[in-house]
Amino acid sequence: MVIILDVHESVTKEFKRDYTDDLKKTVVAFANTDGGEIWIGVEDDGSLSGLDKPDDTIRQVTCSIRDNIKPDLSMHTRIDIRTIEDKQIVVVEVQRGTACPYYLVGKGIRPEGVYIRQGASSVPATESLILKMIKETGESFESSRSLNQELTFMQSQRFFEDEHIKFGQEQKRSLGLIDSNGTWTNLGLLLSDQCGHTIKAAVFEGDSKITFKDRAEFPGSLLKQVEDTYRYLDQFNHTRSTLSGLKRIDYRSYPPDAIREALLNAVVHRDYSYSGSILISVFDNRIEFVSLGGLPKGISYNDLLLGISEPRNIQLANIFYRLHLIEAYGTGVPKIMDHYLEYDKKPTIEISDNAFKIMLPNMNEQRLESEHPVVLLTPDEQTILNLLRDRENLVRAEIESATGFSQAKSIRVINQLISKGELVKIGKGKRTHYRLAKGSGASLN
């Protein structure tokens, strides 16, 4: 006599005639969704077949869950033998886990290793759903498990070796690159050769984003990205030289330390839960650094200027500190501002809910402006200047004749140009004549 159970497969229940290796997928799916039960010894149609050796089945199930699923699910599973109509079956009860996503050890935290329940089936989870589950566990981005578990660290290894710091498995674990389950964390991903985040830099002609002069993108370990990006930006940090007596004095367009601090700030404090790149734009008059993620909660713009800091990525900041890339938390922005104390144009910071931008003004451009201030001219003044650019010098009568100005108007305009440093008066009386001042270069108002 065939016994048909008055239950059916559903989102929380699955039947299996015997133990099979794919049972682990169903366990993972239940743990990642709303829990459920697996009845072993029951046909797909609900007919009861029973098990001859249920104890052996329990051992198989126990070993499969222990050896093939991470994180550990032992606290969220219960396996019992039930007797129905003189037939024995094994029931595996799985609760929804508290450390989702659960995954198959051999596949990793990828769609082929993470399953969920959909109706009466166990199906692979999408990457976006996996990321959502990771975020909902309440872990920080750094300590959450990386979706990519095939990581290498050739680029980062060099930085640790240069500072004579060990970077073996034990150190990777203590630094937070490996979690308690032995899996790579997102912090590990950020320092790995496979890091998916990048820095993009672009150089523009003039002061707007109309014409590109050059662009580059820097992938790989964040440590390598910082090194490559700084080297790239240094090409466009031009040097202007002046003479002071017998000494030559060189001025950089931007303080190298300010570029370094702005770059490190963008890398260490950005929100890596966003997939976009850090953007750096180089103009003739400024450099802009834009990173994703606003200020951490509780920190204001004024706090930044005072040196108060709340690192978003504490473990990443700690690694940069150990490698002597940053000195101490909160010193970056004040150090940048200190470089511009003697200049009228200061670095500016713009903050939104999801982005942070710091702008560094070109200091050489400010030096030129202070040495050669722009003088605004009236059309009448410009007329006389244009006339003198074609002649070495002129007397007032020649200026009046060429421009058609009256004597009074000519005297007034000429005196205005002398006061603005654009004209020089030479001689006295009838022999008085005028010529352009050295370095004259005013702009029409």
Image (cartoon, rainbow, N blue to C red):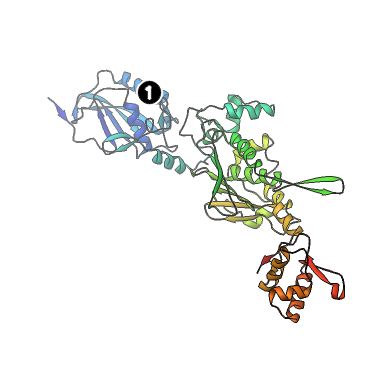
Q: Please give left or right for residue 341 compared with residue 289 in the image.
A: right
- Residue 423 position, x and y percent, is 78, 67
* Picture quadrant where residue 81 is located: top left
- Residue 94 visible from this viewpoint: no
Above or below, 200 against 94 in this view is below
Which residue is painted at 87% across and 45% down in the image? 246
Q: Residue furthest left?
A: 1
Image quadrant holding the N terminus, namely top left
Amino acid type at image mark 1? Ser
> Where in the figure is residue 193, as x and y percent of width and height?
54, 30
Near-viewer residue (145 or 79): 145
Residue 381 in the figure: left or right of residue 52: right
Give the image location of residue 24, x and y in percent: 35, 27
The residue where tag 1 is placed is 64
The answer to whether residue 8 is left or right of residue 316 is left
Q: Are there few (<14), some (14-19), or many (20+) residues within 10 Å of tag 1?
A: some
Where is 35 relative to 351, above or below? Answer: above
Instruction: Locate the C terminus by quadrant.
Output: bottom right
Horizontally, is 288 left or right of 243 in the view?
Answer: left
